[in-house]
Amino acid sequence: MGKTAFIFPGQGAQVCGMRQDFYEQTKTGREIFDRASGLLGFSMPELCFEKNDRLDITEYTQAAMVTTSVAMLRVMEEQGYRADVAAGLSLGEYCALAAAGVMSDEDAIRTVRERGILMQEAVPAGVGGMSAVLGMNAEEINAVVDPIANVQVANYNCPGQIVISGLKEAVEEASEKLKEAGARRVIPLNVSGPFHSYLLEEAGRKLGGFLDQIEICRPQIPYVANVTAQYVTEAAEVKPLLIRQVSSSVRWQQSVEMMIADGVDRFVEIGPGKTLSGFVKKINRQVTVLNVEKLEDLEKLGA
């Protein structure tokens, strides 16, 4: 019998109205959204379900995404669905922490609210940038990017899709050189900062200070750290990895490959969109990939 992984999307998957059915039709879902409102001092249902300008602003996006995915997770668990391992892309790692019992739901939501504020404040708007590089492998991209100052690989998403991040001018220079070197396309991303780059190292250090007041527990199931693409099984490993994660590359492809090598043959994406499902299918077409976006999607999971 193979293993099941619950996987959680990151920033960029948010959409107005996301998972409103979990809020309106389940007691557990409603409680988690309302608890987040009490913790953060603003209405989480209003942020997630009503048209507004805040949902795409990092300091709000992160708390909204984690609240949404954690609410879905707890409803699923209540109905008997369980994972053997957990993982999340970037921000989604905090949902994996909650799934693994490393942080309480409340602490995960409070931490990503602080993380979002720190990341928003780290670099003035317009100074940094990110671009997705299509049609080149990691070695080819690193050969072009490494000699250029102030830009680095931010995300190893899947074969043929890697994201670079850094100072805007450096990202633009790297983008031109990558096209010359054979990239099929280089697409600038509509993001509010140069995430997972050295420019956020100070934000990571400040996050470490906030994490000092958060109770970190030993994982009840293994979760995969973005920074190492390895399982975390001890509480002492968690905080240093979360500090590094803010400014380090997200090794998503390597994380999925490691889980498959460990016997995971079923991936369930929990949260808005199907981004991670698409990545997993490009990494390995033999595994089963399911995604839960709506309450009715739980029926396709089976027992």
Image (spheres, helix red, strand yellow):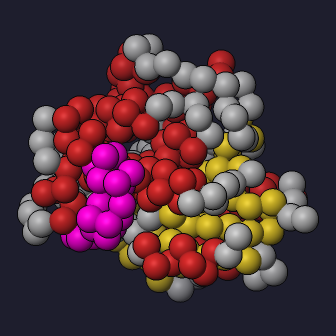
> Viewer-proximal residue, 219 or 25?
25
Q: Is residue 10 above or below residue 296?
A: above
Q: Residue at x 79, y 55 (%)?
A: 258
x and y percent of residue 135 in the render? 60, 81
31 part of magenta stretch = yes
Q: Quadrant of residue 223?
A: top right
Q: Residue at x 62, y 51 (%)?
A: 87
Q: Is residue 202 among the parts visible in the rendering?
A: yes
| Residue 128 relative to residue 250: left or right | left
Q: Quadrant of residue 65?
A: bottom left
Q: Residue at x 49, y 47 (%)?
A: 95
Q: Residue furthest right?
A: 1
The quadrant the C terminus occupies is: bottom right
The stretch of residues the image draws in magenta is: 15-33
Q: Residue furthest left?
A: 52
Q: How many marks?
A: 0
Q: Quadrant of residue 172?
A: bottom left
Q: Is residue 38 above or below residue 274?
A: above
Q: Main secondary structure of the magenta part?
A: helix
x and y percent of residue 122 in the render? 27, 35
> Viewer-proximal residue, 74 or 47?
74
x and y percent of residue 231 in the render? 74, 41
156 part of magenta stretch = no
Q: Is residue 121 among the parts visible in the rendering?
A: no
| Residue 239 relative to residue 71: left or right | right
x and y percent of residue 40 in the render? 20, 35
> Viewer-proximal residue, 19 or 92?
19
The quadrant the N terminus occupies is: bottom right
Q: Residue at x 69, y 54 (%)?
A: 83
| Residue 264 relative to residue 21: left or right | right
